[in-house]
Structures are given as structure tokens and as C-alpha cells.
């Protein structure tokens, strides 16, 4: 099992050290409805393989799964990100406190404003400015946002309040993106422009987390990124302007397969 240990990397300038593969817990929800106990065990087993970064959100329904796993290991062993769709600092702090309770933890490593669109850049900066103060209380270690927008990535890469950006980064061609908008919902710009924006963010010291690496799914109508998971993961793992990636996984077999690919990409 130790043979499969994934590399640990710096997440931008946050001081957080995360595995090159992060566990996206969105898939614990519907339609599989994996129980908190079962999901928690998958997270623990993935941690034993070196996956120390778990991504959740206040609307995934997977806080109980992460909480169940957190009970089984020392808290500092893993980096947990969660998100809020709040649009004001008051709402964001309410969501943060609720997430702390649901996760049954004293702190959250990475707190992200969820799915920030290009029409809310100024507003999100204001909320982040107010959340920034909470870092001094050690309730949160790093803050930032997730987005599907090239404009957002480009602009917030210049905001000192932003530590971390989670965004779309996959090997799909522009034609594929155009065809599979439901799976890879790039809000604006082209995939090439997204790569340029991410490079800028990374150069500016932001921690960059890739998502949609497998095109969001493997259903019959999905793009082929999931079916071609080896090539899809490898191409993103090789990029020096991506720190880590969160991939949605449902079982340990997928974790092992994806770890093997990451190892083959970085060795
Ligand atoms: N912040 C945001 O706006 C946002 C949005 C979406 C997602 N996320 C985060 O990112 C994570 C990933 O979600 P995503 O939408 O980007 O999806 P993704 O990681 O591109 O694709 C996830 C799907 O890939 C499949 N998969 C995983 N490993 C595989 C393998 N080895 N072979 C074949 N299929 C494999 C899984 O489906 P099967 O199990 O059916 O094979 C899973 O449903 C989420 O869990 C969440 O944490 C964030």
C-alpha cells in the first residue's frame, strides 16, 4: 500500500501541504447515497494511501462523511476544504460556523466562496476581506473561491485576499467544451484562456486546485475524459502551474487507479 503514496505539494503560499490528488466528496451524495460511515472509511483508506486533502461543501451533503473520517485520525493530518454559496460576510460566517459544527472540528483549512461568477467579483472581494480577519482566530487557515470563469480567475489572481482558487482545468479541446457544456461548464472565455489565467494566478502565489479533470462524470452522455482517465489525469498532473486536483471518487479502487496515474506523471 505504501508503494502508492502520492507526492505532497505546497498549495501556493498558504503554507498548507496537500497531496497532488485531492478527494472530491460530491459523489457521496445522490444517486449513490453512500453512508457517512462508508464514505468516512473510504476517506480514511485514501488517507492511508497518502491522500491528505479532502474537498467538501456546505451543499454536497458530505460533511457527515468527512466528520466521520476526522474522528479517526489526528486533525492536523488532513487538509479540509469546504465552501459556501453565501453572498455576504454575515451569511458566510453563519455557514462557516455551521460547517465547523457539521464537520465537528475547531478549524477549516480552506474556506471557499462557491461558484463565483463574473458578475460578482467586487462583491466576493468584499466578503473575502471580512473573512480574512478570521485567519487571525485560526478558525480558517486559507480563503479563496471556486469558479468556472476565466475572467474571475484572471482578476482575483491580483487580489491579496485570495489564497486559493479552485477552477476548471482539463485536457478537453475547445470543441469538446462547446459540445459538453453540461459537464464542463466554462462560464466565459476559452479553455486556452483559462490556462493562461491559471498561469497568472499561480505566478501570483495563489494555490491552484484543478477540477473537472475527468469532465465531471462517466455517464453515457459524458465527454470521454473519464473513460480515458489515465491520459486526462496525467496531462493535468504534469502542469507546473497546477498545485493539486480534486477528483470525484466513489470507491477505493478509483483512488488507487488515479494515484497510480499521478505517480506515473510525476516520477
Ligand atoms: N467548486 C465547484 O464549483 C465544484 C464544482 C464541481 C466539483 N467540485 C469538486 O470537484 C470534485 C470533482 O468533481 P468534478 O465535477 O470536477 O468531476 P471529475 O472529478 O471531473 O469527475 C468525477 C467523476 O469521475 C469518475 N471517476 C473518478 N475516477 C475515475 C477513474 N479512475 N476511472 C473512471 N472514472 C473515474 C467518477 O465517476 P464514477 O465513480 O461513476 O466512475 C466521478 O463521478 C467534486 O467532488 C467536488 O469536490 C467543485
Image (tube, helix red, strand yellow):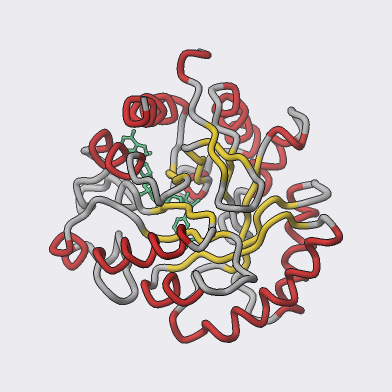
Report the front residue among 75 and 99.
75
Left or right of 63? Residue 240 is: left
Q: Residue furthest right?
A: 137
Q: Is residue 205 above or below residue 4?
A: below
User: Percent from the top left, x then y, of residue 13?
Assistant: 61, 53
Q: Is residue 62 above or below residue 153?
A: above
Q: Residue at x 47, y 46 (%)?
A: 243
Report the front residue among 94 and 171.
171
Q: Is residue 118 above or below residue 262?
A: below
**Tally of numbered discs:** 0
User: Percent from the top left, x then y, of residue 116?
Assistant: 50, 74
Left or right of 19? Residue 137 is: right
Q: Quadrant of residue 44?
A: top right
Which quarter of the figure is the C terminus placed in?
A: top left
Q: Is residue 106 above or below residue 202?
A: above
Left or right of 9? Residue 72 is: right
Q: Residue at x 50, y 50 (%)?
A: 26
User: Percent from the top left, x then y, of residue 153?
Assistant: 44, 70
Q: Residue at x 59, y 61 (%)?
A: 59
User: Percent from the top left, x then y, of residue 127?
Assistant: 67, 78
Q: Residue furthest left?
A: 175
Q: Residue furthest front?
A: 203
Amino acid at each position: 500500500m505504501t508503494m502508492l503514496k502520492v507526492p505532497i505539494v505546497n498549495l501556493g503560499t498558504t503554507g498548507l501541504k496537500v497531496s497532488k490528488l485531492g478527494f472530491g466528496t460530491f459523489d457521496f451524495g445522490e444517486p449513490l447515497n453512500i453512508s457517512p460511515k462508508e464514505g468516512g472509511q473510504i476517506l480514511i483508506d485514501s488517507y492511508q494511501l497518502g491522500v491528505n486533502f479532502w474537498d467538501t461543501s456546505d451543499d454536497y451533503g458530505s460533511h457527515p462523511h468527512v466528520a466521520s473520517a476526522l474522528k479517526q485520525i489526528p486533525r492536523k493530518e488532513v487538509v479540509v476544504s469546504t465552501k459556501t454559496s453565501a453572498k455576504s460576510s454575515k451569511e458566510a460566517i453563519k455557514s462557516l460556523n455551521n460547517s465547523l459544527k457539521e464537520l465537528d472540528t475547531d478549524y477549516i483549512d480552506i474556506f471557499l466562496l462557491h461558484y463565483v461568477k463574473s458578475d460578482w467579483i467586487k462583491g466576493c472581494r468584499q466578503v473575502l476581506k471580512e473573512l480574512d480577519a478570521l485567519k487571525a482566530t485560526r478558525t480558517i487557515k486559507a480563503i479563496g473561491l471556486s469558479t468556472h470563469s476565466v475572467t474571475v480567475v484572471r482578476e482575483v489572481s491580483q487580489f491579496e485576499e485570495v489564497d486559493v482558487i479552485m477552477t476548471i482545468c482539463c485536457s478537453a479541446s475547445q470543441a469538446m467544451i462547446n459540445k459538453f457544456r453540461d459537464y464542463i461548464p466554462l462560464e466565459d472565455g476559452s479553455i486556452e484562456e483559462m490556462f493562461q489565467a491559471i498561469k497568472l494566478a499561480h505566478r501570483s502565489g495563489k494555490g491552484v486546485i484543478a477540477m473537472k479533470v475527468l469532465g465531471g462524470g462517466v455517464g453515457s452522455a459524458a465527454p470521454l475524459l473519464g473513460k480515458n482517465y489515465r491520459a486526462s489525469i496525467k496531462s493535468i498532473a504534469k502542469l507546473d502551474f497546477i498545485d493539486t486536483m480534486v477528483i470525484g471518487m466513489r470507491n477505493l479502487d478509483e483512488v488507487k487507479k488515479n494515484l497510480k496515474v499521478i505517480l506515473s506523471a510525476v516520477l
